Image (cartoon, rainbow, N blue to C red):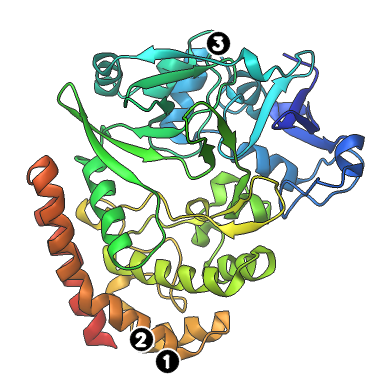
Amino acid sequence: MAERLDVFFGTRLVGSLRPRAGGAVAFEYSAAWLEGEASFAISASLPLEPGLNRTRAAQAFFANLLPEGRVREAVARQLGLSVSNDYALLEAIGGDCAGALSLLPGSATLDPSAGSYERLEPEAIARMARSFSVLAEVSGRRRARLSLAGAQDKLPIRVDRNGDFWLPVAGAPSTHILKVPSRDFKHLPANETLVTALARAQSLAVVDVDLVCLDDVEVALVRRYDRLVSDDGERVTRLHQEDLCQALGLLPSTKYEQEGGPGFVDAMTLAREHSTEPLVDAQQLLRWIVFVVLAGNADGHGKNLSLLRGADGRTARLSPFYDLVSTRVYQRLDRRLAMGIGEERDPGQIARRHWEALAREVGVGPRAVLREVERQASSMVEKLDEVEAVHASAHGESPIIRRLRDAVGKQCKRTLELL
């Protein structure tokens, strides 16, 4: 195990990680980064200060770059590492993370030209997808260093101008995220594709998601919002981001509000204090929380909201919304929301008073909140029909659409009744 991991923003050295007992980490900004005019704090929870930071915030920021749950267990098993060892996992797969930071062993020299790509055939991706081990299998390759947070099995890839798929190796940047089917939840890629399109129809800023069929396996192909690709497709620039848990210094194990994680008030506060367009982003957050309730997305937690910095690292905006699914269509999942509305988490019980309480908590006029709830609840079923028609013309009717229409229709009707 390396004595330290150097953290880079592009080719600039930001700082270094040091291992601590039990796989924990400590972080220190480099002197050059602290003195640089174009430097910035990599997290709202990690101010630009000298010295070794051993706080939970440092641990949380870097732990939130890693996969979670079964995916993390599979990756650790494939690499022969302890599942609880954040430092060792970051050393092994920290070359291409969410955002703009790359982590390399301290003895290594960052060479932007060293990164390369290996062709990924659709049949090979489909084979890995059927075994539900895409990220773990690829992580076992000697030069692939890929990390994505979250519990769903997914793979960072590069898609070229011809639509071919390539695996980044030796720290090369990806351009897309490929999400494969779930062992537990049927038609999850189609679910995300449809719900994301529905959110766009409801005036939310969302990521681009396409449903792609690879050797009879449906996958969701998500264009990365934290990457800029040049017009000729040759140059990929990483953009820095941090999710709400990172910004608040919270470990991924506390991403749910009922477990001490962020609530909607925290999201609004972050946008107002750190966004360069706080009013626009606050309006988008309001649309998001209303949509989460109506679409039956009980998994809208703190890691599903992020701040995205510009290429220079100085401007910050709320990122496009991602990981949008309707968990309500899966009956065995808890229907209670990850973020409460006026302290109510059961979407079937959220009444006018709860929306008004939420408005007061975030300093928004209750009438504005109620108008947004009524706007979306009154139009969502019709918008879903339009989205489904477009989807069906491209992919055929999805097996999940009936359940999705039923879940959305019932929730919209119930919400309007309680207003």
Q: Which residue is mark 1?
A: 367
Above or below 36: residue 81: above
Residue 259: x, y in percent?
53, 57
Label placed on residue 286? none
Relative to 369, 163 lies left or right: left
Above or below 11: residue 120: above
Label placed on residue 371? 2
Hey, which quadrant is residue 219 in on the image?
Answer: top left
Residue 242: x, y in percent?
61, 48
Q: CA distance from mark 3 to mark 2?
A: 52 Å
Hey, which quadrant is residue 134 in on the image?
Answer: top left
Residue 308: x, y in percent?
59, 51
Q: Which residue is mark 3?
A: 143
Q: Nearer the viewer, residue 287 or 186?
A: 287
Q: Residue at position x 51%, y 26% from top? A: 234
Above or below 165: residue 151: below
Determine whether the residue tagged by mark 3 lies in a helix, strand or loop.
loop
Q: Which amino acid is tagged 3?
A: Arg
Residue 82: x, y in percent?
58, 20
Q: Which amino acid is tagged 1?
A: Arg
The reply to whether the C-beta atoms of the residues labelled 2 and 1 are less than 8 Å apart is yes
Q: Which amino acid is tagged 2?
A: Arg
